[in-house]
Amino acid sequence: MAKNDLKLLGGWFSPFALRVRIALNLKGVEYEVIEETLNPKSDLLLKSNPVHKKIPVLLLADKAICESAIIVEYIDEVWTNAPFILPQNAYDRANARFWVAYIDEKWVPALKSILRAEDDDDEAKKPHIEVAEEVFERMEEAFNKGSEGKALFGGDTIGFVDIGLGSFLSWIRVVEKINGRKLLDETKHPGLIQWAQTFSAHPAVNGLLPEPDKLIEISKAFKQNLMAAAAAAAATK
Amino acid sequence: MASESSEVRLLGKWASPFSNRVDLALKLKGVPYKYSEEDLANKSEDLLKYNPVHKKVPVLVHNGNPLPESLVIVEYIDETWKNNPLLPQDPYERALARFWAKTLDDKILPAIWNACWSDEKGREKAVEEALEALEILQEALKEKRFFGGENIGLVDIAANFIGYWVAILQEIAGLELLTIEKFPKLYKWSQEFANHPVIKDGLPPRDELFAFFKASAKK
């Protein structure tokens, strides 16, 4: 497919957009990236994802596909060359979907809540950090059980769960920096620590993980915008 | 084929739309299965063993292999028993079906649920959001008989809450959310859905469901 036919509406900071980039890179597909700042949300975004108004959106000539995990499945189904992102076996495939859904349901809200809290508000952050710790405990278990001694959740190649979790590596570092405490720890998560190195170094990922310090900067700016918007809303009631 | 003689078990809760999705999928495929009713106040050893992460129903156990999460289970069922496909063949159409199933869980069901259980203070806003959610869903239906086209598909199953539970919950809450006047196409779909020969037999009895939620409302 010619480069111009496939566009990804994403953001350098977005782990969800990163999932799509990794999938496309794995398949060797050419695509154009359109950077969305979300401030304000572009007309293109509002038009192509009217229901959720979120990135990423995969833009084909006349169609748009939304929701990162769904886009990754689409990519795997359209570009049937190796590597296969979803497992071939139906039960393994269901398990992969289960874990990605788990990451999205548990880790993502915890991350958002941690970022929303004031840096020194440990009380507010505590329950969410506990959720995050449980997530990584379970993912360590899942990795050790499922990878069968291989380097990645997908075995020898990057798979659905690798993409689902690995796309958050920079944001995991952000939380670690803000809290001065490790979320992924050599003693508690030896499997995931190795996995993170393998994942980051993979050619499909290398260079795409954003700098945690830059993420801290934009997350501060985003928090200020949120507070300003909340104050403005309160003032107009 | 291995699936012919396989053992299928469902751990569920009769009043739960999530559990019901799996019943519907299995019935649509004509797959025989053993059903265990779970008491969520007194979770069985099996449930804790088969779903240690969430400790919730539904859980499908196929040949001893457990699988939780209703939408994950429904896709697994579709991929394992190939008759009466629940998802389209075309990758883009499949992506759309998955999108609407997810949007139902992430946005539409919560909006309706909140509206039905909201207190006086939050009621107006919750109802507004619920009506917006139903509008979005109706637009997705377009002129089709079912979300799956001529036949019941993944999205119809995922929308079972809308097709059957909402009528009961809105009556208990004294709200008018899904009505023929407000959402004629979606209302018509809900009738087609609830009266579909296989679905009809798979849904929990209306009176019992009403009594169950009415009792919860009193608490």
Image (tube, coloured by chain):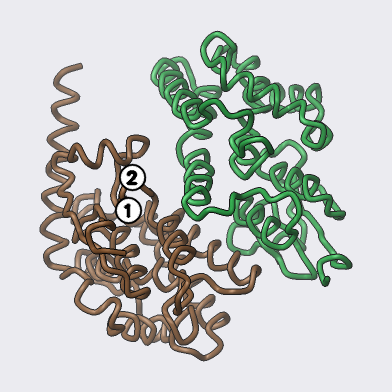
Chain colours: A brown, B green
Q: What residue sits right under mark 2 in the picture?
A: A62
On screen, residue A88 above or below B94: below
From the top left corner, tell me how far across and down residue A82 is, in percent. 45, 79
From the top left corner, tell me how far across and down residue A19 is, in percent. 34, 64
Choose top left, top right, bottom left or bottom right for residue A162: bottom left
Subunit under mark 2 = A
Q: Residue at x 31, y 73 (%)?
A: A25
Q: Residue at x 35, y 46 (%)?
A: A64
Subunit under mark 1 = A
Choose top left, top right, bottom left or bottom right for residue A6: bottom left
On screen, residue B3 above or below A156: above
On screen, residue A219 above or below A236: below
Q: Residue at x 45, y 37 (%)?
A: B107
> Which mark, residue A131?
none
Task: Say which amino acid is labelled 2.
Answer: Asp
Specify whether A237 is left or right of B20. Answer: left
Q: Residues within 10 Å of mark 1 (few under 14, many from 20)?
A: many
On screen, residue B176 above or below A6: above
Q: What residue sits right under mark 1 in the picture?
A: A58
Q: Residue at x 15, y 70 (%)?
A: A211
Specify whether B179 is left or right of B91. Answer: right
- Say what secondary structure mark 2 lies in: loop
Q: Residues within 10 Å of mark 2 (few under 14, many from 20)?
A: few
